[in-house]
């Protein structure tokens, strides 16, 4: 049991945690994730890869919606831009995959300014509708610029070779996605504690008070848009590599709903919630499929024909239940469990 937190040096202040137990568990988690691609079968390895890619995208959306309070339904639009930027750079122009990944972040970041500048005075539902329209405009432009994007035909994408290391195999590509997820997680944890991260939260909590404290609201919102879109674009590039074929059909609007569901289920505004929510939402259809399989083969077959509708329904049910019974999400539930453990047998 700990009676308080004391910081005596700058190093202790900078550390993400001062708990040796937390560091040990983080080391165990990293080791387990590093070994997992060699121990899982092909199907479960694909689930692990999808979880890693989704974590990257959700952390990006969390910067805009969770920290800054700007609701966005254009998540899938920025993913598509990132995927096409990488595919065009590496497959059409033969650029190095590292350059392609940089462009996969920069192109959505620049595009976010196009939608962000006109939307500076918009909040809530109006901003959500604007970002939703942006996602549909992106899809339309991709189909129109057939000479660059190959329209509805799409672009075939190969797994990259970075710094002489080939990520062509499923195990190697899973390590690449896990590495990006780890980097995005560390970047998010440090960004949240930085000056601009605190400005994001100040704008979310009370924009008038933030302006009174000297925070430039327009600049802060634009930085939030660009930062969020850069990270989401990287997730889109990774997802395009995973699919091996980049086309707008591979990025349905359901991905935007899924990202918002992850934030709500995990806990809006928390980095841990983005990770826990991703694991829960990605595995939810798998767990429900196993449950329906126990009801009989005919039931499982009938539900498999409407898998897309079933997934949408499960997301809706999860959002409703968490908003009603656990509004702080899985991250809030984890905090309650830790508080109960520390203060037991007392309530507080």
Image (spheres, helix red, strand yellow):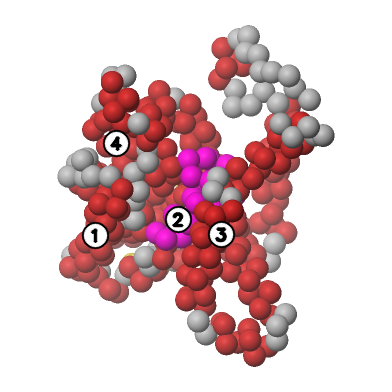
- Mark 2 and mark 1 lie on one chain; the one further toward the N terminus is 1
User: In the structure shown, which secondary structural element does the residue marked by tag 1 occupy?
Assistant: helix
Task: Estimate the spatial distance between the alpha carbons at disc 1 and disc 4, rounded to whole Å.
Answer: 19 Å
Which contiguous range is marked in magenta? Answer: 256-278
- Mark 2 and mark 4 lie on one chain; the one further toward the N terminus is 4
The C terminus lies in quadrant: top right
Task: Estimate the spatial distance between the alpha carbons at disc 3 and disc 2, rounded to whole Å.
Answer: 17 Å
Q: Which residue is mark 2?
A: 259
Task: Estimate the spatial distance between the alpha carbons at disc 2 and disc 4, rounded to whole Å.
Answer: 20 Å
Q: Which residue is mark 1?
A: 133
| Label pair 3/4, CB-CB below 8 angstroms | no
Task: Estimate the spatial distance between the alpha carbons at disc 3 and disc 4, rounded to whole Å.
Answer: 31 Å
| Label pair 1/4, CB-CB below 8 angstroms | no
Q: Which mark is residue 297?
A: none
Q: Which residue is mark 4?
A: 221
Q: Which mark is residue 321?
A: 3
């Amino acid at each position: 049991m700990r009676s308080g937190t004391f910081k005596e040096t700058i190093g202790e202040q900078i550390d993400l945690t001062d708990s040796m137990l937390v560091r040990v568990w983080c080391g165990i988690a990293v080791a387990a994730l590093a070994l997992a691609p060699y121990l899982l079968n092909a199907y479960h390895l694909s689930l692990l890869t999808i979880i890693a890619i989704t974590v990257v995208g959700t952390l990006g959306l969390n910067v805009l919606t969770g920290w800054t309070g700007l609701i966005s339904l254009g998540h899938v639009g920025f993913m598509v831009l990132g995927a096409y930027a990488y595919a065009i750079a590496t497959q059409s122009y033969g650029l190095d995959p590292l350059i392609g990944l940089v462009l996969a972040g920069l192109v959505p970041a620049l595009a976010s300014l196009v939608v962000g500048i006109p939307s500076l005075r918009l909040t809530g539902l109006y901003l959500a509708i604007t970002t939703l329209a942006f996602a549909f405009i992106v899809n339309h432009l991709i189909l129109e610029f057939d000479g660059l994007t190959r329209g509805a035909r799409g672009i075939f994408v190969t797994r990259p070779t970075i710094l002489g290391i080939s990520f062509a195999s499923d195990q190697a590509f899973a390590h690449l996605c896990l590495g990006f997820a780890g980097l995005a997680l560390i970047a998010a944890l440090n960004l949240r504690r930085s000056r601009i991260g605190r400005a994001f939260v100040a704008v979310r909590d009370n924009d008038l008070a933030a302006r009174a404290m000297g925070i430039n609201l327009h600049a802060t919102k634009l930085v939030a848009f660009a930062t969020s879109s850069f990270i989401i674009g990287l997730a889109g590039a990774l997802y395009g590599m995973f699919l091996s074929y980049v086309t707008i059909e591979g990025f349905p609007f359901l991905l935007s709903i899924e990202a918002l569901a992850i934030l709500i289920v995990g806990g809006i505004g928390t980095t841990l919630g983005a990770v826990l929510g991703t694991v829960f939402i990605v595995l939810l259809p798998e767990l429900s499929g196993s449950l329906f399989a126990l009801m009989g083969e005919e039931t499982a077959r009938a539900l498999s024909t409407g898998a897309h509708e079933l997934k949408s329904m499960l997301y809706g049910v999860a959002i409703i239940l968490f908003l009603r019974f656990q509004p702080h999400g899985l991250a809030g539930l984890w905090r309650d469990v830790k508080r109960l453990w520390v203060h037991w047998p007392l309530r507080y």
